[in-house]
Image (cartoon, coloured by chain):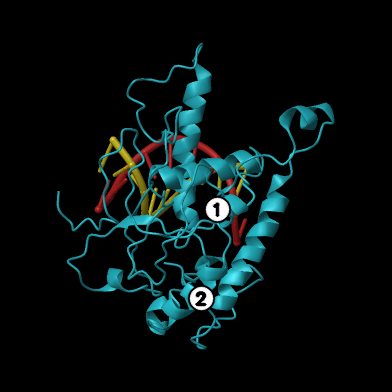
Chain colours: A cyan, B red, C yellow
Amino acid sequence: MGSEAGGYDFDFLGGGGEYEGRVAEWEAGLPGCDELTPLSQPLVPPGLAAAFRIPPEPGRTLLDVHRASSATVSRLRSSPGSGSSPSSGPNAHATGGGGSFPSFSSKGDGNSAESAGEKTAAKRARLVWTPQLHKRFVDVVAHLGIKHAVPKSIMQLMNVDGLSRENVASHLQKYRLYVARMQGSASSDRPSPSDDHIFASTPVPREPVPAAPMPPAVYHHPAPMTMGGITGGGHSGYYQHQQHAVYNGYGGGGGHSYPHYHHGDR
DNA sequence: TCCTCAATAT
DNA sequence: AATATTGAGG
């Protein structure tokens, strides 16, 4: 259809392994998670905000931070020289940002498009909304406020590589239905037992003790960046970067999977 | 151009 | 079932 955007800067593939060195260098200088300001929490206490009628405008702040983060990352990965698609706008490189990678399940037999970061109308594998990814989504939506929580903004603030506006729009649509259903005829906060999903009142099952790093999400790429130091500690702030797949967010722990590529099997 | 929603497809 | 896609309407 549209020959528009499709601006997925998956230059990792083109660049090759040259990134690893750079990325490692970059990682070395990054602050730990604990040192980052947890943006998932309001900077102004709710009570205070309410008392002074502070209008909700966290988006600005988050965007600002995101931009800085994005700029840093894009600077680091602007080596392969080519790229430089003029794109359009200051935040155009957000797509190649240093966020986390969403989980996708691919169906190919290990051939064609999926293996490469297709830029030409190639179909993307289905996104898997892991609890971590969903939490990020919910966090962003919560901070944007009902008025500004639109697909584009959410997508930008989530800063997840490869996440499209459509992905977010689709998820948002469903999420809204869930929320509406819940506040609609719910005398008590008691979701249906069947709402055992990410949408459940307890979106991301709190792990009692974060023994293992909590990767936000995964993408099915040849892993241009593999890092291992950042642990998802208790709080999930925004700038987390990809680690390894395994999404095992469920209490009790035990099951951990891989960035599983679903090899078209069912 | 983007957003939202319902219906539909995979 | 979960996610994607489309299409209408704003």
Label 2 environment density (alpha carbons within 10 Å; few <14, some 14–19, many ≥20): few
Q: State the quadrant of the N terminus of chain A.
A: bottom left
Q: Residue furthest bottom?
A: A81
In the picture provided, is A161 more to the left or to the right than A130? right
**Looking at the image, which is closer to me, A222 or A264?**
A222
Hey, which quadrant is residue A10 in on the image? bottom left
**Residue sitting at x 40%, y 53%:** A217
Q: Chain of mark 1?
A: A
**Looking at the image, which is closer to me, A221 or A144?**
A221
Q: Residue furthest left?
A: A266
**Residue sitting at x 60%, y 43%:** A40
**First in sequence: mark 1 or mark 2?**
2
**What amino acid type is highlighted by mark number 1?**
Cys
Which residue is label 2 attached to?
A25
- What is the number of the mark on residue A197? none
Hey, which quadrant is residue A69 in on the image? bottom right
Total marks in image: 2
Residue A90 locus on image (x, y percent):
66, 70
In the picture provided, is A160 more to the left or to the right than A71? left
**Residue sitting at x 32%, y 74%:** A116
In the picture provided, is A136 more to the left or to the right than A72? left
Which residue is label 1 attached to?
A33
Secondary structure category for the residue under label 1: helix
Q: Chain of mark 2?
A: A
Secondary structure category for the residue under label 2: helix
From the viewer's perspective, is residue A78 above or below residue A202?
below
Label 1 environment density (alpha carbons within 10 Å; few <14, some 14–19, many ≥20): many
**Looking at the image, which is closer to me, A186 or A34?**
A34
